[in-house]
Amino acid sequence: MIIFRLSLFYAAFAAALPAPGRIGENMSQPFSQAEVTPWNAGAVTEFAIHSSCNATQRRQINLGLNEAVSLAMHAKSHILRWGNNSDIYRKYFGNSPSMNAIGAFDIVVNGDKKDVLFRCDNPDGNCDLQGYAGHWRGKNATDETVICDLSYETRRSLSTMCALGYTVSGSETNTFWASDLLHRLYHVPAVGQDWIGHFADGYEEVVDLATTNATLSTHDSETLQYFALEAYAYDIAVPGTGCPGNQQKHHGSDLAEPDASANQTSSTSTASELSSTTSDAPAHCHTHAGGELHCT
Ligand SMILES: *[C@@H]1O[C@H](CO)[C@@H](O)[C@H](O)[C@H]1NC(C)=O
Ligand SMILES: *[C@@H]1O[C@H](CO)[C@@H](O)[C@H](O)[C@H]1NC(C)=O
Ligand SMILES: *[C@@H]1O[C@H](CO)[C@@H](O)[C@H](O)[C@H]1NC(C)=O
Ligand SMILES: *[C@@H]1O[C@H](CO)[C@@H](O)[C@H](O)[C@H]1NC(C)=O
Ligand SMILES: *[C@@H]1O[C@H](CO)[C@@H](O)[C@H](O)[C@H]1NC(C)=O
Ligand SMILES: *[C@@H]1O[C@H](CO)[C@@H](O)[C@H](O)[C@H]1NC(C)=O
Ligand SMILES: [Zn+2]
């Protein structure tokens, strides 16, 4: 009915103009275009948060995820700008080409976010265990990550970067929501693609990996976290200074240094941070090889 009336209208209108064929062509285009599905139809641009998360939990996870994306975005930008001219880049990735690390950060920023779910209902019961701040569900539900109550009490905003005693080398990577969630995202196959794994544990091993096996460093979860944190601290939080903490060249050499920072690797500076890292300590159960439980 509408089509019929439109074409009647066209016919009358076109007849009054000198080039009727052209008008008909142009006017018909929007109609045929509208039938073509956009190439990115169905794109998922937000991480999903399960209905088991209440309003405050959802809000904190959302803020944390936004910060994880900001952290990854800056890490990528730093590499794109400086490549291996960056001391921070070379410290963590050695001589490796920059594309792998760029991609590892970009997938968090721009990758499709379907098949990633955060939930709060403790379906596997692991949140009842002391020190569990969350876990990847592994074989039980490989797309799913559980966030436990301890996270809401201990994880910090990136706005506190370099404050409250935090240093990159002396503090845990899970001090911040951003890096903690980056780690958790890398366990989800849609993000980490079973390519990002755990090849080094802790700051010293991560720094060593850059020289012993730089190829592995660009897909090591902890290396990516440490790099992102240090780049963010140095470029954004305290520009030109950052908070790298005690820089040791080699394993064990820090003990030979006379200064007070000799305690850095085993201690954190403030009472609140100490309590958060100690309560997290038992949760350092990394049994990823078989896709199993991982806690932090
Ligand atoms: C029809 O489209 C062509 C190019 O797409 C344009 O050059 C022409 O001006 C259009 N004609 C009218 C009447 O809008
Ligand atoms: C959400 O759940 C947490 C943990 O059970 C609780 O502490 C918090 O008060 C709840 N928030 C709301 C808005 O109910
Ligand atoms: C930096 O990368 C370039 C290639 O882009 C390479 O030729 C050079 O050896 C690298 N330098 C270091 C110190 O890794
Ligand atoms: C780096 O690690 C990979 C994977 O484990 C291994 O195949 C390779 O031989 C290692 N390279 C060096 C120089 O250790
Ligand atoms: C190192 O830490 C211990 C407690 O963990 C403390 O007793 C000692 O004084 C510290 N040493 C320095 C040099 O800060
Ligand atoms: C998967 O579920 C089983 C049975 O409920 C549980 O024992 C196991 O800890 C769960 N795995 C993870 C990674 O939570
Ligand atoms: Zn892990």
Image (cartoon, grey):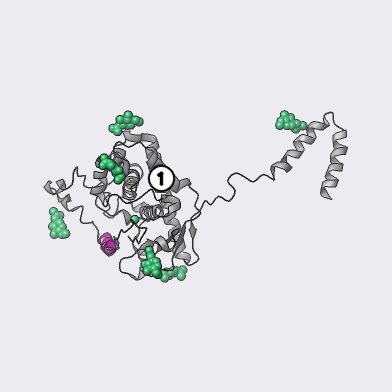
Ligand number 4: quarter of image: top left
Examine the rendering and report whether any part of residue 210 can be seen.
no
x, y percent for residue 190 = 45, 52
Query: Magenta segment: does it hold 275?
Result: yes
Examine the rendering and report whether any part of residue 127 can be seen.
yes
**Image height check: is 143 above or below 89?**
below
Q: Quadrant of residue 239?
A: top left
Q: Residue shown at 31%/47% (left/top)?
A: 223
x, y percent for residue 115 = 49, 56
In this rendering, the count of numbered labels is 1
Q: Quadrant of residue 119?
A: bottom left
Residue situated in front as seen by the camera: 19 or 209: 209
What amino acid is at disc 1?
Phe
Question: Please, what is the dominant secondary structure of the magenta stretch?
Answer: helix
Residue situated in front as seen by the camera: 33 or 229: 33
x, y percent for residue 126 = 36, 68
Whether residue 278 sits left or right of residue 64 in the image: it is left
Q: Residue shown at 82%/29% (left/top)?
A: 19
What is the quadrant of the C terminus in the image? bottom left
Q: Quadrant of residue 214?
A: top left
Query: Magenta segment: does it hold 227?
Result: no
Magenta range is: 273-281
Judging by the rendered image, the residue that carries numbered circle 1 is: 105
x, y percent for residue 200 = 27, 50
Q: Residue shown at 35%/45% (left/top)?
A: 219
Q: Is mark 1 within 8 Å of ligand 7?
A: no
Whether residue 10 sits left or right of residue 249 in the image: it is right
Rate crowding at label 1 as few (under 14), some (14 to 19) or many (20 or more) other CA atoms within 10 Å. many
Residue situated in front as seen by the camera: 61 or 125: 125
